[in-house]
Image (tube, coloured by chain):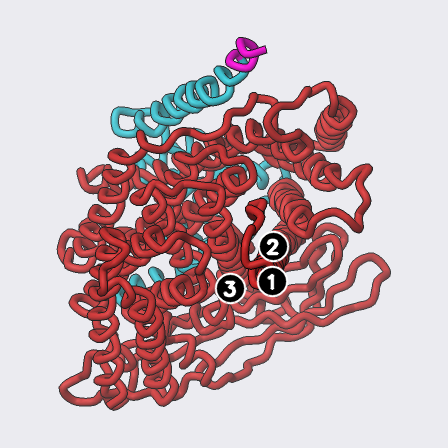
Chain colours: A cyan, B red
Amino acid sequence: MMRFLVALLALIATPLAAQDSMPPAPYAYTQLQDPALEAEAVELMETLRCLKCQSQSIHDSDAPMAGDMRHQVRARLLAGESPDQIRAWLIQRYGDYVSYQPEVSATTWPLFAIPLLLLAIVGAILVRRLGRRRSDEGDAA
Amino acid sequence: MIAELGLAALWLSAALAVLQMVAGAMGYRSDKASLAIYARPAAVVQAFLATLAFFLLLYAFAITDLSIKLVATNSHSMKPFVYKLTGTWGNHEGSMLLWVAVLALSGGLLAGLERRLPERTMSATLGVQGFVALGFYAFLILSSNPFERLPVPAPEGSGLNPLLQDIGLAIHPPTLYIGYVGLSVAFSLAMGALITKQVTPDFAKVMRPWVLAAWVFLTFGIGAGSYWAYYELGWGGWWFWDPVENASLMPWLAATALLHSVSVLAARDALRTWTIMLGVVAFSMSMLGTFLVRSGVLTSVHAFAVDPERGTFILVLLGLYIGGALAVFALRASTISEGKRFSATSREGALVFNNVMLSAILAIVLLGTLYPLLTEAFDVRVSVGPPYFNPASAIFAIPMFAVMAVGPLLRWKDDNPRRIQFELALLGAVVIAIIAVVAIFGEYPVLPILGLAFAIALAIGAFLPLRGRNLKRVPTATWGMVLAHFGVAVSLFGMASESAFTSERLAAVAPGDIEEVAGWSVELESVSPVAGPNWTAFEARLNVSRGDGETVEMRPQNRNFWAPPQATSESALLTRWDGQLYIVIGDAAGVDEAGNQRWQLRVWWKPFVTFIWYGGLIIVLGGIISIVGRMQVDLKRRRFAAKAKQRRDEEAELGGGVVPEPAE
């Protein structure tokens, strides 16, 4: 998409000299044996931001850092941590920015308050535009 | 010479935009203003000049004129010819020139073709269009000149981002821009009608084909971009809720609401203020999208703050046009009555409901896109992604789909829901049955299940308006609606199915190894180096088969470009009626026990994923059929009117005396 146009700018800014030559961590490109655990991993990885990319989750990025983070997610799930614990650990390490799933907090509450407000507005508009018409008709009849 | 000619054409276009603006304003002030006659020719000549400027830049890219800065920084003499051409708009200045050329072209078409509106309204419309165009010419010439020369020609260009070296770049940006900027005509028409207080069904009939055409292009452009991202990025994602994607989705949502609203105005003389408001919002969203993409604000708010020239320029234009339009709206809205009334259970009622839902989804997308930018300005970085957008928009999308399935069955003005109780019961039963069946067969997330259920109900609902009608006598435009609604159902089905049922297999494999995914067996035969015009690659040969079916060879590549240096994965896709097999080869991954080289392999089976884009194409087809249908009716009406006029004239000549009043 047009994201490429932006990616272009980003790429010019950061030359590829920084490309890692290290082999990827074991679980970067390898699934977990247990399908249920792997499904949990995918669900979590889809909601974590690849910090080196332009708006991609770590689940769909080739960046070495995304690979390392995938390894962390899978290895920690295998070690028995819950997805929420892993997310909390990553947020503690990289900040709120790493999670695509905003939590209600002092900085993000409008993200949740405004949709609620929107619901109220939508309800009000519908009642005004559609509700009254009916009673008008009723009056006329 | 080429560059200088191009720049001169742009300056002349800008001058003509001033003339168009002034002539339009004079024409609005008084019918007899002598200057007014220049508005139309100014728009037409401007369209020609701006398009010429664009083709001159295209030529400069085609011959790789390295004395032009833009060509030197974005092209390369060794690049395949088609990508030299498409590279014209694969950068900021070039894509803004395309934007402006499309703007001038739509203004020229409007001025050249549209004869149905009262002259005063037309003058005001052209004046507004000229005013909008002027701002963007100024932006292009003053802060983004695509024709700037280098003091010394570069020996070689720096090349184009390899991700952009794809046929997608030839299709996606131009169609998207035609849609984006085509909405400027809807904006100008809405302002013209508002200023001259001519918000009538006739005005709506004039506006409708422009909105429909822009919407068709927008739909196609978004679909093409989504498929491009899907196969090019190499991870099988087709929608990322990326701000740049949202920037194209927002005008689409507004345009969808607008085209339904304008239809109600044309058919029933209701929803006058709504239509005007949506006309303003739709193009405002196009401009906002342009600001988001073109100002650099998305890469980083701070990068924007360091080099704010372009961003500030667009921001000022945004404030001027959106603020101005809203001010005119506030001043004039009270002079327009709401129009004819209707009950909640009527076709208008259903359309109002869904317009409100579309607007609410637009508000959610807008909030989720802008909020992170806002907090970043205060040094708080948050990410808003699919876990936010999906449920928040579904709150409004699910009721919308429900009403969409039954809305077209309702009659205009007022209807008794009991008349369509059979259809209601049928669709309700379908939704419940599918949810139950899918929930029994496996554990899937809630939203994809709802998506599947509503997709199938919508697909049935789309054809219900044809029930009991003589198919030969159904108006062409109705077929368009039926198809477009069916396309939405098909697309929704693809999205839900991909989300719920995709199977993934990641593995490091050596030649001879076999991997299994969702009934497919994938054997790596060999990996060999290949070379293209400006890249080298490792190409995997894979033998894939499903069950006892025949074996097919697939060849994904892992490419390395050298100008600029970057690796991309060329996925290999195998399309079957029930989905796509998506294979990517990654990097080398050590050796196995026997000492054979292993390679990273990523394989997905995505059931019915193609339906997303088939649906998009069906929507586009529906839109086109709708335009054709409306034009047929319009031409027929004009022919009758001309014939009636001729007959009256003949009678007047014969009788010389009493001429009967024409009946409309």
Q: Confirm whether circles 3 and 1 share one chain.
A: yes
Label 1: how many Cα within 10 Å (few below 14, some 14–19, many 20+): few
Q: Secondary structure at mark 1?
A: helix
Q: Nearer the viewer, mark 1 or mark 2?
A: 1
Q: Residue B90 placed where, x, y %?
A: 37, 70
What residue do we see at 43% from left, 69% from top? B164
What's the CA distance linking mark 1 and mark 2?
A: 26 Å
Q: Is residue B332 left or right of residue B260?
A: left
Q: In the rendered structure, which segment of residues is drawn in magenta?
A: A135-141
Q: Chain of mark 1?
A: B
What's the CA distance linking mark 3 and mark 2?
A: 48 Å
Q: Residue A101 placed where, x, y %?
A: 41, 34
Q: Secondary structure at mark 2?
A: helix
Q: Confirm whether circles 1 and 2 share one chain.
A: yes
Overall secondary structure of the magenta stretch? Answer: helix
| Image quarter hosting the C terminus of chain A | top right
Q: Residue furthest right?
A: B548
State which quadrant residue B411 falls in: top right
**In the rendered image, the vertical position of residue B215 relative to residue B73, given as above or below:** above
State which quadrant residue B178 falls in: bottom left
Q: Nearer the viewer, mark 3 or mark 2?
A: 2
> What amino acid is labelled 2 in the image?
Arg
The residue closer to the viewer here, B278 or B596, is B278
What's the CA distance linking mark 3 and mark 1?
A: 72 Å
> What amino acid is labelled 3 in the image?
Glu
Q: Which residue is mark 2?
A: B637
Q: Chain of mark 2?
A: B
Q: Which residue is mark 1?
A: B654
Between discs 3 and 1, the one toward the N terminus = 3
Q: Residue B549 placed where, x, y %?
A: 84, 62
